[in-house]
Amino acid sequence: MRPVIEALLSAAFEFLPPPQQQSIIEAWIDRGTRGAAARWLKAVAQVPALFDEKAVMAYFRSSDDERAAKRLASQASPAFLTEVLSELADRCEEGWVVSRAAMRAGAVGDTVWPIIRSKHPATYLYLCARLRRDISEADALELVMTCPNSIMNRTRGLAIWAVGQMGMIRVLDEVVARGAELHRRDIEEFQRFPG
């Protein structure tokens, strides 16, 4: 019976009076399950006034649930994102979540850039392009060459786009010249997947 009730509450949530919404949110948080957390995070996306960035960050810290990171990147205040950006960059698997958080943050601190660079090289290049951060051509080429283009992780295209946005024509020419090497790497990566 509980799953049916939870589904109904979730579907009707945005139409309920604010006191009932708050009560439901608190019940979902207290339940502590991933299903309840999914409903909670969906509800605060529908009713932003109920979003509590500290509660969502605490949940992310305890669960590494990427849905919480996505909510933070989309809804947390710029000051809060500045404060937690290094942790998000280090723990998030999705580079686009990190880039959204960085773009919305009040600032990207000097200690955060190396984390983004090592964990999410394509995101690093994207942020360099969007935030006009200086990067050498040699460094940009190295990052493009390390970005995968596998079935599970296609970030090289973003890296190449960012290099183009920064006007690094020589880097693009070098990527084209090393196309056979990149193709060989892609084939090797593809062959590692079972099936």
Image (tube, rainbow, N blue to C red):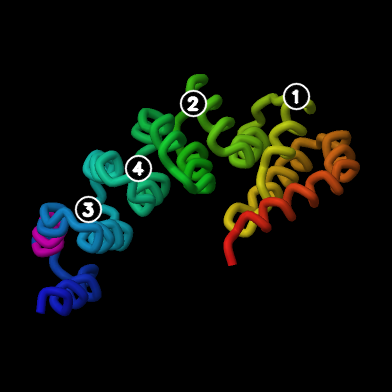
Q: Mark 2 and mark 3: span between their CA atoms?
A: 29 Å
Mark 3 vs 4, N-terminal side = 3
Q: Residues within 10 Å of mark 4 (few under 14, many from 20)?
A: many
Q: CA distance from mark 1 to mark 4?
A: 32 Å
- Between disc 4 and disc 2, whose residue precedes? 4
Amino acid at dot 3: Leu
- Which of the 4 image quarters holds residue 136? top right
Point out the tag, 2 or 3, that comes first from the N-terminus.
3
The secondary structure type at the circle numbered 4 is loop
Q: Residue at x 58, y 31 (%)?
A: 117
**C-alpha distance separating marks 2 and 1:** 18 Å
Q: Are marks 4 and 2 in contact (CB under 8 Å)?
A: no
Q: Is residue 14 above or below residue 112?
A: below
**Magenta part, dominant SS:** helix
Observer-side mark, 1 or 4, equals: 1
Amino acid at pointer 2? Val
Residue occupied by mark 1: 136
The answer to whether the residue labelled 2 contacts the one labelled 3, judged by CB atoms less than 8 Å apart, is no
Specify the quadrant that holds the C terminus.
bottom right
Q: Which region shows up in magenta?
A: 20-26
Which mark, residue 112? 2
Marks 3 & 4, CB-CB < 8 Å contact: no
Q: Which residue corresponds to mark 3?
A: 50
Image position of 3 with respect to 26: above or below: below
